[in-house]
Image (cartoon, helix red, strand yellow):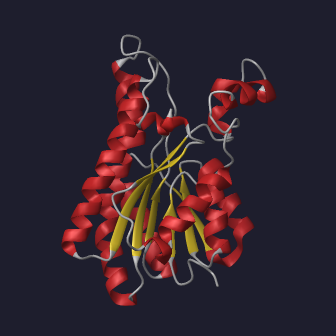
């Protein structure tokens, strides 16, 4: 049985990497999915691969008006929204002293403010869709293990991703109090083999870079996009109906050290 049958999802940052992997698995499990990305052409290409169950729209997640447009689009195209995946983000690495004010604001705008915008603006549509269809809803915020374990050279990224984890808990408690039938959880991946790692592996070559990163992880390897995608499928499914306010670590054991 398809685990997400009857559900409508919106996934940001879906032109590649984790977002594209989640969109694939969601469609495989019976959902209809709107893929959004500032890279509109990339999102459209991924949606075309998924067939009639998918659509796409260009979307700058730091722009409230574009959030409103994306939400109006998913309602018009598919009839509502059950699942929101706040996945869009950037990686940035520098110390607190080396981080410019502009870089600090940019990282927080994309990695944190966009999650707030998504949750705030999507909830009315999600609550209405859940009420009208009787199908449970869920918000999944993609944080990072960097929001749990700090590094000396990731001041802005650590800050933004840690805040996503705590915002998730606040949203979860709000939804529970309002009896919306919507859960809210975060996923905290370790290094995953996606284009975002290119800044870390480029200088030494892909294979050597991945091997070096993998040696930092107890399981001995970086993750694959499907490791996160399957976690998202679980949290979006009714299997996780009693899981809310939780941070799921897809981290190969690194946070246990």
Provide residue 93's location: percent of width, then percent of height.
50, 22
Say if residue 40 shows up in the picture.
Answer: no
Identify the residue at horizontal 67%, vertical 78% (top origin): 52
Identify the residue at horizontal 31%, vertical 62% (top origin): 121
Residue 225 vertical placement versus 190 (above, below): below
Say if residue 217 shows up in the picture.
Answer: yes
Identify the residue at horizontal 40%, vertical 30% (top origin): 158
Horizontal arrangement in the rendering, residue 188 relative to residue 27 (left or right): left
The quadrant in which residue 35 appears is bottom right
Horizontal arrangement in the rendering, residue 209 relative to residue 59 (left or right): right
Residue 51 vertical placement versus 150 (above, below): below
Comparing 68 with 215, the one in front is 215
Residue 139 vertical placement versus 252 (above, below): below
Comparing 219 with 143, the one in front is 219
Provide residue 233's location: percent of width, then percent of height.
56, 66
Identify the residue at horizontal 42%, vertical 41% (top origin): 111
The residue most toward the left is 177
Provide residue 223's location: percent of width, then percent of height.
66, 44
Where is the N terminus found, in terms of image quarters? bottom right
The quadrant in which residue 176 appears is bottom left
Horizontal arrangement in the rendering, residue 91 relative to residue 210 (left or right): left
């Amino acid at each position: 049985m398809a685990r997400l049958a009857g559900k409508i999802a919106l996934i940001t940052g879906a032109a590649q990497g984790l977002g594209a992997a989640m969109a694939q698995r969601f469609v495989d499990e019976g959902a209809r999915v709107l893929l959004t990305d500032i890279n509109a052409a990339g999102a459209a290409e991924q949606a075309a691969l998924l067939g009639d169950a998918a659509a796409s729209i260009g979307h700058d997640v730091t722009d409230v008006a574009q959030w409103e447009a994306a939400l109006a689009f998913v309602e018009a195209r598919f009839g509502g929204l059950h699942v929101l995946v706040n996945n869009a983000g950037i990686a940035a690495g520098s110390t607190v002293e080396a981080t410019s004010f502009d870089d600090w604001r940019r990282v927080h705008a994309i990695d944190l403010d966009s999650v707030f915008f998504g949750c705030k603006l999507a909830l009315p549509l999600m609550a209405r869709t859940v009420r009208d269809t009787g199908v449970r809803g869920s918000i999944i915020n993609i944080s990072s293990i960097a929001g749990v374990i700090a590094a000396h050279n990731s001041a802005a990224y650590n800050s933004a991703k840690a805040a996503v984890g705590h915002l998730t808990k606040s949203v979860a408690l709000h939804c529970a109090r309002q009896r919306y039938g919507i859960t809210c959880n975060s996923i905290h991946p370790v290094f995953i083999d996606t284009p975002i790692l290119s800044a870390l592996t480029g200088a030494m070559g892909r294979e050597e870079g991945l091997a070096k990163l993998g040696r930092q992880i107890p399981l001995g390897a970086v993750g694959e996009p499907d490791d996160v995608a399957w976690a998202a499928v679980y949290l979006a499914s009714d299997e996780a109906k009693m899981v809310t306010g939780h941070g799921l670590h897809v981290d190969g054991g690194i946070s246990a050290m």
